[in-house]
Amino acid sequence: MTVAVIRFGGSNCDRDAVRALRTLGIDAELAWHADGLPADVTGVVLPGGFSYGDYLRAGAIAARTPILEEVRRAAAGGLPVLGVCNGAQIGCEASLAPGAFTTNDRSRFRCEHTFLRVETTDTPWTRAYEAGEIIELPIAHAEGRFVIEPGRLETLERDDRVLFRYCDADGRTIAAANPNGSTDNVAGIVGKTGAAVMMPHPERATLPDTGGTDGRGILRAFVN
Amino acid sequence: MPAFTATVTVRLKQGVLDPEAETTRQALERLGFDVEALRTADRFELDLAAADPATAEEQATEMTERLLANPTLHEYEVTVDRR
């Protein structure tokens, strides 16, 4: 019974994710993508990094590996799946969630802390928070601008599937608080099967010594 | 089977921001050029064998739909030439 953190060539947040989960008492292990999902898997993390060197588009190649077919089936069966940063790009490329994360609006790599407003508490990923709560998580990406086809954002909002929006310290979702030009300040969403994709890094905000513990609530979705 | 080269051009849909193109345009302006707008595109050349041009185009189109283009961001065109 373990959460599988899937490692691709170029993943680099995989060990952090395992350590963060174990800190919370959640059994987790690395899974090399070509080995497939472990039989006793209880959840999946698609970690951050630069899988396949970001060739073609960030996440595009990893999204077409056979293990993602397994992950899609598992997600449809109710398994919790979380894609963080490059994992979020992979998740969208693999249709675990709609839209795409593409080049930041000012073509810069943004590595900083961001404030996020919790937009729904009606998901396993956000039930640990209060609605409207402001949390602080780090980002580190060059391709985090959330883009979605016209009309589909309204569907996401109607279905209450926006998890977080970038905001300022007071919770205002203003343009100045949007680090990458994401549509409507969206930082994370859930797909139809409940798989979550988000650019900020919850696993980097689980230990007090490394800048806060606001990410713990997201990872608690993996507690049975 | 006859040999073809399918050329796939993938570009951003109208209205999708292209920060790399804008940065490149600004660099051209710094060099003293006057450029109103600049658009970028990816071009893939696929050498393949197929019974006829229509089949070659069909194969290249499927490759584009499944990998080379992202339907959220891109539009594309496919042309086929005998090789």
Image (cartoon, coloured by chain):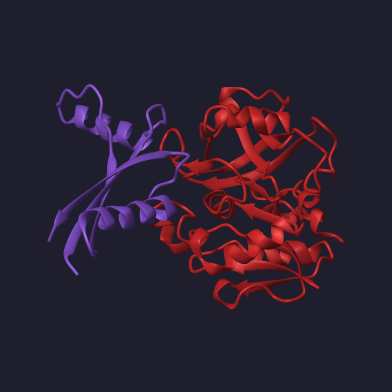
- Looking at the image, can residue A60 be seen? yes
Report the quarter where the C terminus of chain A lies: bottom right
> Residue A166 versus residue A76: which sits nearer the camera?
A76
Q: Residue at x 48, y 44 (%)?
A: A143
Q: Quadrant of residue A36?
A: bottom right
- Looking at the image, can residue A144 be seen? no
Report the quarter where the N terminus of chain A lies: bottom right
Q: Is residue A46 above or below residue A171?
A: below
Q: Position of residue A41 (x, y in %)?
A: 75, 70
Chain letter for the red part: A
> Residue A43 versus residue A158: which sits nearer the camera?
A158
Q: Position of residue B19 (x, y in %)?
A: 38, 34
Image label count: 0
Direction from residue A6 to residue A221 in the image, left or right? right
Q: Position of residue A47 (x, y in %)?
A: 61, 59
> Residue B36 versus residue A147: which sits nearer the camera?
A147
Chain letter for the purple part: B
Q: Residue at x 75, y 33 (%)?
A: A119
Q: Is residue A64 above or below residue A58?
A: below
Q: Quadrant of residue A66?
A: bottom right
Q: Residue at x 84, y 40 (%)?
A: A129
Q: Is residue A106 above or below residue A90?
A: above
Q: Residue at x 68, y 54 (%)?
A: A82
